[in-house]
Image (cartoon, grey):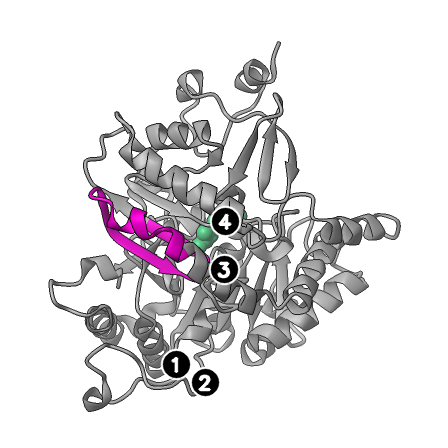
């Protein structure tokens, strides 16, 4: 039996109606090489969405491979309760310096990081004598993972509705998604109007609210919805004012995706006064960014190599758990917490960022690729073309119900692996894409848009 038949028979694929696999076989990948996936017949496909947004520096990256191989000769895994090791200590120190948040708690995937941040936030309020602060607010169309707690703060009906009976009620406030601004309204003005709704909600419910969780700047699973950083600035101010934690879910946008190492860095610590706001909606020169109370990281953390996630938080929150009573501590755990191989991969990723000055290099790459997309942006079917850092997205007009599948297939035929979300096409390439790959990708997008039946 071939691999496709065997996978249908034995593997239950994620986020998939398995019956559809009969008509749409998965790509049988034999190898990876840089930004390319190579199937069992030797055909090459550009991994234009970085294998669900996790891959930063390509498949089989020699430097990450070397770090993991080296670690394999030392210790592959040891439990992190009652033991520690250099890879987890070094990674925690480095992430602490990068985020300004001093303590790192590890898990294995993004959804678990969400669970940890939610539990830690509510537990903090309990430890500080406010057990009633245990509710959560998230943004409309937000995505924070699929486990029951994470799904409770997720707002994507396709993933959530079926399990509604299992979930804890949470509150969703309007999304600052710039596409929803009134005609003639700036993205910033719309973001601030949305923040007013958050203000009104907190004014009434802060005493029952532990935290606001959001994806800074880009709501990925909603279809790469982008919004103005003024929302984050205002959310930070409101969370301070009403004593509510701000959880930055940077699982997708962390590690340079939005053009800065972390997306929250693009939100200034304070907004200009009303009169100072420019016509263009541009903010006053940055005077230091906001800092969330918790940041959740995963996806790019290991460069797409191994499942690892982390929640970083402030010394103040950490201190509220520190004491003589065991139950005051955060007794959450996962068997593979702080896995040494994964931590070494993550450290190798940070080395590459530093050594290759990746953030600066990406800035130039992004300008070049945006230029290559001129014709796509101008295409008659393209709406709301948007770009931030190493993410590009647009909505497609006249898209039928099976648009995503048809576009996926048309792109595969042109050597590009891409999976639209509904009628939104997005590109999130590994940072190592070269000029030739970007050209191929731009040409493929344009050709697929024009193809009959797509
Ligand atoms: C992918 C994602 C998650 C969930 O991460 P998993 O590793 O898939 O559990 C949570 N939040 C955001 C913003 C994500 O993009």
Q: CA distance from mark 1 to mark 4?
A: 28 Å
Q: Closer to the N terminus: mark 1 or mark 2? A: 1
Q: CA distance from mark 1 to mark 3?
A: 25 Å
Q: Which mark is residue 365?
A: 3
Image position of 429 (left or right of 77) = left
Q: CA distance from mark 2 to mark 3?
A: 26 Å
Q: CA distance from mark 4 to mark 2?
A: 29 Å
Q: Please give the name of the residue rendered at 27% of the width and 71% of the height, measured from the top-left corner.
A: 205
User: Eyeballing the image, is 435 above or below 388?
Assistant: above
Q: Closer to the N terminus: mark 3 or mark 4? A: 3
User: Eyeballing the image, is 152 above or below 44?
Assistant: below
Regarding residue 263, the answer to whether it shows in the image is yes
Q: Position of residue 355 (x, y in %)?
A: 69, 67
For label 3, the crowd category at 10 Å Cα-Cα, with few meaning under 14, some 14 to 19 and many 20 or more, is: many
Q: Which residues are magenta?
A: 370-393
For the C terminus, the image quarter is top left
- Label 4 CB sits under 8 Å from any ligand 1 atom: no
Q: Quadrant of residue 245?
A: bottom left
Q: Position of residue 316 (x, y in %)?
A: 55, 81
Task: State the residue position of label 2.
Answer: 288
Q: Which mark is residue 219?
A: none
Q: Position of residue 349 (x, y in %)?
A: 66, 59
Q: As rendered, which of 376 and 203 lies closer to the eye?
A: 376
| Pointers 1 and 2 in contact (C-beta within 8 Å) | yes
Task: State the residue position of label 1.
Answer: 268
For label 4, the crowd category at 10 Å Cα-Cα, with few meaning under 14, some 14 to 19 and many 20 or more, is: many
Q: CA distance from mark 3 to mark 4?
A: 11 Å
- Label 2 CB sits under 8 Å from any ligand 1 atom: no
Task: State the residue position of label 4.
Answer: 429
């Amino acid at each position: 039996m071939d691999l496709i038949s065997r996978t249908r028979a034995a593997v239950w694929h994620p986020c998939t109606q398995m019956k559809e696999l009969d008509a749409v076989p998965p790509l049988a990948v034999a190898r990876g090489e840089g930004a390319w996936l190579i199937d069992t017949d030797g055909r090459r496909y550009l991994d234009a969405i970085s294998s669900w947004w996790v891959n930063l520096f390509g498949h089989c990256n020699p430097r990450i491979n070397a770090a993991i191989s080296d670690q394999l000769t030392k210790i592959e895994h040891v439990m992190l309760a009652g033991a520690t090791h250099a890879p987890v200590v070094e990674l925690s120190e480095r992430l602490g310096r990068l985020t300004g948040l001093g303590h790192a708690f590890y898990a294995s995937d993004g959804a678990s990081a969400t669970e940890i941040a939610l539990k830690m936030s509510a537990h903090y309020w309990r430890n500080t004598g406010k057990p009633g602060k245990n509710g959560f607010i998230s943004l409309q169309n937000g995505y924070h993972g699929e486990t029951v707690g994470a799904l409770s703060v997720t707002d994507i009906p396709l993933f959530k509705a079926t399990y509604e009976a299992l979930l804890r009620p949470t509150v969703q406030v309007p999304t600052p998604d710039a596409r929803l601004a009134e005609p003639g309204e700036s993205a910033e003005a719309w973001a601030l109007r949305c923040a007013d709704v958050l203000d009104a909600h907190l004014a009434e419910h802060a005493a029952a609210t532990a935290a606001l969780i959001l994806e800074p700047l880009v709501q990925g699973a909603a279809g790469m919805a982008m919004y103005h950083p003024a929302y984050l600035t205002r959310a930070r101010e409101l969370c301070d004012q009403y004593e509510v934690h701000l959880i930055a879910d940077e699982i997708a946008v962390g590690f340079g995706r939005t053009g800065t190492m972390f997306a929250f860095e693009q939100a200034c610590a304070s907004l200009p006064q009303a009169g100072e706001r420019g016509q263009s909606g541009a903010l006053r020169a940055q005077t230091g960014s906001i800092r969330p109370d918790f940041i959740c990281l995963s996806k790019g953390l290991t460069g797409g190599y191994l499942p690892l996630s982390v929640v970083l938080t402030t010394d103040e929150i950490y201190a509220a758990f520190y004491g003589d009573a065991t139950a005051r501590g955060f007794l959450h755990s996962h068997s593979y917490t702080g896995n040494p191989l994964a931590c070494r991969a993550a450290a190798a990723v940070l080395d590459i960022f530093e050594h290759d000055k990746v953030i600066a290099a990406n800035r130039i790459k992004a300008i070049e690729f945006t230029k290559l997309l001129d014709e796509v942006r101008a295409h008659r079917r393209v709406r709301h073309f948007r770009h931030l850092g190493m993410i590009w997205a647009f909505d497609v007009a006249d898209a039928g119900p099976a648009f995503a599948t048809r576009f996926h297939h048309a792109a595969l035929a042109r050597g590009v692996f891409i999976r639209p979300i509904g009628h939104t096409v997005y590109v999130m390439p590994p940072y190592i894409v070269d000029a030739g790959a970007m050209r191929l990708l731009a040409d493929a997008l344009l050709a697929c848009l024009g193809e009959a039946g797509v």
